[in-house]
Image: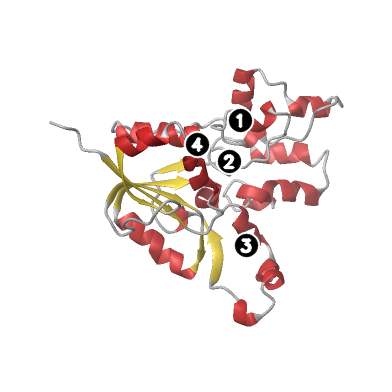
Amino acid sequence: MKKKKLRIGIYSLTSCSGCQEQIMDLEEELPEIVKAVDIANFEMVKKLDEKAKVDVAFVEGCVAKAEEIERVREIRRKCGFLVSMGTCATYGGIPAIRNLHEGWKFEKLVYPDDSMRLSAIKASPLSDYVKVDYFIRGCPMNKLEFLEVLKSLAAGKKPRELNYAVCVECKKRQVPCLLVKFLKGEEGGGICLGPITYAGCNAICPANGVPCLGCRGPFEDSNVESYVQMLEKHLKGEDVKRMLSTFAGTSKKLIKFV
């Protein structure tokens, strides 16, 4: 008996569509993906049937407009397994920076004319409104991680979450620690959020000489308080807040520090 294909839908809320672009960038694997799964909806390519029932829904972007609340709830009702795709969907991402500022001054700067004002609400992760079964983090998400998640789900298995720091991946790749270099005053070092950030990116930034900016958010067992104390010895308070608030500042782990 022929095995039934996994039926998936790829949806987008408030976002830059960068995570969908990562899927499109799977140039060699995409033809095989199309053969292996039944794609009911893929917004960047074509809206086939947004209201169709699917086995797995991959949702990119945060809930930042009033109408998106019911939309994400409808997606949840129509799917068996929901995957939060990227940092916006997981934490609120960069749009959630506005939540940290009284009166949402950014909205007033961009849309000074009241007639142009959007139906904006607090930028929130999907999990504020619906049950999320798995989180793919990153800004944008890692395309190979998406592929591994899709393979696991197609095989009937729940993907394994990595609850450890980017530093572990640096060690595996034998990447010299940029933070240690900074603390020693050596050239090429920098303040790096790798010690408190979820792994899964294969340490792509540190491996290229760029300190981790924390785009994957703080991992569950991270000692954020201790790390912030260390940062405050080397940076001004406002600079620490700016670093922590960029991608996941509204997360439970970071909100009290920003």
Residue 192: x %, y % from top left: 72, 35
Residue 95: x %, y % from top left: 60, 58
Q: Mark 2 and mark 3: span between their CA atoms?
A: 19 Å
Chain-order first, disc 4 or disc 1: 4
Task: Determine whether label 4 and label 3 are within 8 Å by CB.
Answer: no
What kind of residue is marked 1? Val
Chain-order first, disc 4 or disc 3: 3
Q: Which residue is mark 2?
A: 216
Task: Determine whether label 4 and label 1 are within 8 Å by CB.
Answer: no
Task: Determine whether label 2 and label 1 are within 8 Å by CB.
Answer: yes
Chain-order first, disc 1 or disc 3: 3
4 vs 1, front mark: 4
Can residue 57 be seen here? The reply is: yes
Q: Mark 2 and mark 1: span between their CA atoms?
A: 9 Å
Q: Which residue is mark 4?
A: 143
Task: Determine whether label 2 and label 3 are within 8 Å by CB.
Answer: no
Q: Residue at x 56, y 65 (%)?
A: 122
Dot 2 crowding, Cα within 10 Å, few <14, some 14–19, many 20+: many
Judging from the image, what secondary structure is the residue with disc 1 in? helix
**Looking at the image, residue 21 lies above or below residue 31:** below
What kind of residue is marked 3? Asn
Residue 149: x %, y % from top left: 41, 35
Q: Residue at x 53, y 73 (%)?
A: 119
Chain-order first, disc 2 or disc 1: 1
Q: Which residue is mark 3?
A: 99
